[in-house]
């Protein structure tokens, strides 16, 4: 589960950074609106498109992080299952060995 903990921390960090950058874009948008009330329609569309593009990038980053996190969890789970199977086989062999010695 150490891998899962590391990946989870990495995912949380990625989300925090992405959310922070999205927050900065929103703040910049609001400052532009306050400072420039007579913004041209072209600039408004351009600004909205840039903000939407940034949001799309953030969503893609989150999706990629979640996919990586899920893959790491599956891999860690498979490793745990293999360890459990190996322990069960070892126990069976030990039981057979003990039974043969009696």
Image (cartoon, rainbow, N blue to C red):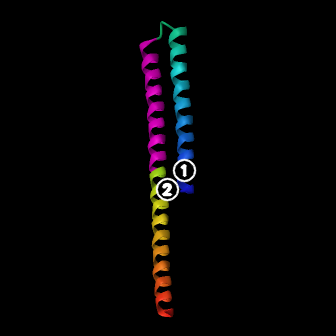
Queried whether the magenta region covers residue 41, the answer comes back as: yes
Q: Which mark is residue 7?
A: 1
Q: Secondary structure at mark 1?
A: helix
Q: Residues within 10 Å of mark 2 (few under 14, many from 20)?
A: some
Q: Which residue is depicted at the point 48% across and 31% down?
A: 54
Of 28 and 101, which appears nearest the observer?
101
Distance, label 2 to label 1, CA atoms, is: 7 Å
Q: Which residue is depicted at the point 49% across and 65% down?
A: 79
Tell me residue 2's x, y (percent).
57, 56
**Above/below status of 72 relative to 46:** below
**Above/below status of 57 relative to 65:** above
Q: Which residue is depicted at the point 57% across and 40% down?
A: 13
Tell me residue 56's x, y (percent).
44, 34
Q: Which mark is residue 73?
A: none
Labelled pair 2, 1 in contact (Cβ < 8 Å) = yes
Of 17 and 86, which appears nearest the observer?
86
Residue found farthest to the top:
38
Of 92 and 6, which appears nearest the observer?
92
Q: Secondary structure at mark 2?
A: helix
Residue found farthest to the front:
102
Q: What predominant SS class does the magenta segment belong to? A: helix
Report the residue marked by disc 2.
72
Which mark is first along the chain, 1 or 2?
1
Queried whether the magenta region covers residue 91, the answer comes back as: no
* Count of number-bearing discs: 2
Tell me residue 39's x, y (percent).
47, 10
Range shown magenta: 40-67
Q: Residues within 10 Å of mark 1 (few under 14, many from 20)?
A: many
Q: Is residue 27 left or right of residue 45?
A: right
């Amino acid at each position: 589960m150490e891998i899962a903990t590391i990946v989870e921390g990495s995912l949380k960090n990625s989300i925090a950074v992405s959310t922070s950058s999205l927050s900065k874009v929103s703040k910049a948008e609001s400052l532009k609106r306050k400072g420039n009330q007579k913004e041209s329609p072209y600039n408004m569309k351009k600004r909205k498109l840039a903000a939407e593009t940034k949001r799309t990038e953030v969503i893609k980053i989150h999706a990629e992080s979640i996919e990586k996190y899920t893959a790491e969890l599956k891999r860690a789970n498979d490793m745990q299952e293999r360890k459990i199977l190996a322990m069960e086989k070892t126990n069976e062999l030990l039981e057979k060995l003990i039974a043969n010695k009696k």
